[in-house]
Amino acid sequence: MKAWWSYFCLPVAVAATLAAPSAFAQSVDTARIEAGGQNDWLTYHGSYKSYHYSPLAQINTGNVGDLSVAWIHIPGRSTRGLQSMPLVADGVLYYTGSYSRVFALNGATGEVIWSYFPELDEALIARQTHSPYNRGVAIGDGKVYVGTMDGRLIALDMKTGKVAWDTKLIDSQKLTVGFTGAPLFAKGTVIIGAQGGEWPGRGPIFAVDAATGKKKWEFLTVAGTDEAMKTWGSDSWRTGGGGGWMPGTYDPETNTILWGTANPAPLYDWSGPDYKTQGARPGDNLYTSSVLGLDIDTGKLKFYHQELPHDAWDFDSAVGEFVMLDRDGQKYVVHPNKSGYIFVYDRNLGVKNVWRITQNSNFVKNIDPKTGELIGRRDFTAGKVSEPLCPHISGGVSWNSGSYNPKTGLYYKLGQEWCMTLEVMKTTPIVAPQAQLNIGADFKIAPPPSGEIYGHLDARDPITGAKKWEVRFPEPPLGSVLSTGGNLVFVPDSRGTVHAYDADSGTELWNHSDGTGHQGGIISYAVNGKQYIAVVAGFGGMASDDYAPTFGGVYKSMPRDDGALVVYSLK
Amino acid sequence: MKSNLGIMVLPSALLAALLACAVPARAQQPPAPPSENAPMDVEQLFATTCGWCHSDGGRAAGKGPQLMNTQRDDEFIRDRIKNGKPGAMPAFGGMFTDAQIDEIIKYIRSLKPREG
């Protein structure tokens, strides 16, 4: 019998250096990521400003009709599809497939420069629910960083793909969870958050020294301070949750990491209105469903806002977008909550405004735009919930990102209109590791009261929420959005079509089928003066698994274990 | 609503002990054995774990198939619970004894549409 530890310790280098493009030369550092760069995509959200915007304008409203496939890459073993956000530096594209497979490709041709397939604890992965997809890498200081489902953060040499260090951060054998989200590189530090919302754990966020792989600090999103511990009555912090499974960003002006956290467990509580003293987890349950400002050097909590105190609906704050805006001398941060409410903060996470992108929402009557306080919240008791809960558990927005275009001043964001029936059940506390999930209700997807399920791309003012235009989709698109200096907005939809819209009007100018649904990233970059659009295709995640039984049609035959990176350019 | 199987509610300490024992059927780390006599509240199990994919307590298709009125035989269901399906269903073989899996199958066979 193979020793269990061997699954973690074997150095694996499925790497074959074929050819290095000419421009490997420059290093990627904090200043370069902050600047964003014309031709690159250096961090998950494009730059620390989190715009998901490329200033490139070679592909524009006048010629986008000539866009066609330049090259395709098949990563293989795409269990649960592809959910990665590609990165590009100096003509080399880095991205991940399922099982944390990492590829470095020539951005102009798709030629494989190196690949790295980590040897994983497959037995552990076989008993994980939210697995084995991976949402991308970070790059910086000459390395590529990737998290694994068995609790490791691995650094690879950017030029060769060889392992520089491999640090075990979580005892995933014990806790079941690991890392699916992309790391963030800033200031010689790699930040990564663990899964957590549905498991008995304390949802840690880690900082690791980029040079050595040594852990610098760890912040527990469940009862991580004395103040927070008081917000979990009946020792309910042991049921856990939290986590920060999507990458946030770095604010160089304040030396702060901004990060969103997931929900507490169980997802649904039977407390009723007396949630401060009754139910599964009495109290506000800090720091779940919150946005945090952590000192990058020490991990100390500098400031926070809990978007949903005592989240009883699984509408967490794990979405990683922190859109940094300057307007009229004011500095803002825009962060979408999973519920579909969009929070506008100052740089210290003080609430400046709250607006909503969804039509169908009834978990609260409203959120006070001045204070962020929940108004008219629905706290369930055990039993059947009479009126369907809106939005559905998959959220009013996806964990994927919208895009802010500084040329139009508009924020392009997808909204999701769907609801759910549910029966809340009083359950026994799950405080031991190895339990898979902790939901607390039976539920089923349902159409909204206003009619059919649908999704929509909105072009809105990011501060006020004022809507300029909207495009509707018969099923909610789940991928990220890209806007460009060519006055274009790209939306990869769930049926498998990539759409390009005029950023000012929403008029569709081009579309092309990738052959399978999208639920991951889309970027733009340039190599040797030529602009490319890169998008990952491949369906089969936690939200998309509902599509075949709910919508039928093309989703019935859509694979859940396949995917490709498709790259477009002008003919 | 309680199922008509008369399944006992699992005391918290017992459930914690059961869950602490959970390891995969094919795991390489030596597990503590599941308790042979631990009773199962399968309805609660669906509300905490299985229902994420098997909607409405197994009565409707969701991320996973509808279990009510399934045409699959017991052996198929037992194997799927134990070994899972890569990328679709986790392997629960280390979490439940054969007797407990039998309880889960009994629950599935007893599923009826909700009233009202």
Image (cartoon, coloured by chain):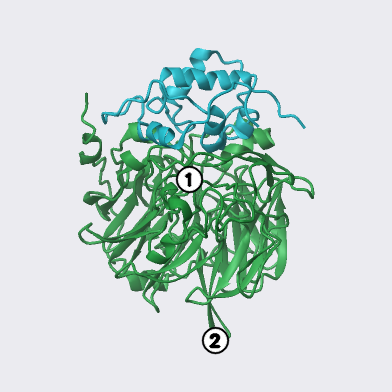
Chain colours: A green, B cyan
Q: In this rendering, is residue A54 above or below B41?
A: below
Residue A533 showing in the rendered view: no
Q: Give x and y (percent) for residue A209.
A: 25, 62
Provide the secondary structure element on which disc 2 rests. loop
Q: Give x and y (percent) for residue A413.
A: 61, 60
Viewer-nearest residue: A266 or A289: A266
- The mark nearer the N terminus, 2 or 1, is 1
Q: Are marks 2 and 1 in contact (CB under 8 Å)?
A: no
Direction right: furthest residue: A450
Residue A450 placement, left or right of A526 = right
Q: In this rendering, is residue A445 above or below A568?
A: above
Q: Which residue is mark 1?
A: A198
Residue A509 showing in the rendered view: yes
Q: Are marks 2 and 1 on the same chain?
A: yes
Residue type (three-letter) at the residue carrying disc 2? Gly
Residue A8 placement, left or right of B8 = left
Q: Give x and y (percent) for residue A431.
A: 41, 43
Q: Residue at x 27, y 46 (%)?
A: A18
Crowd rating for badge 1 (residues with CA inside 10 Å; few <14, some 14–19, many 20+): many
- Mark 2 and mark 1: Cα distance apart in space: 41 Å
Crowd rating for badge 2 (residues with CA inside 10 Å; few <14, some 14–19, many 20+): few
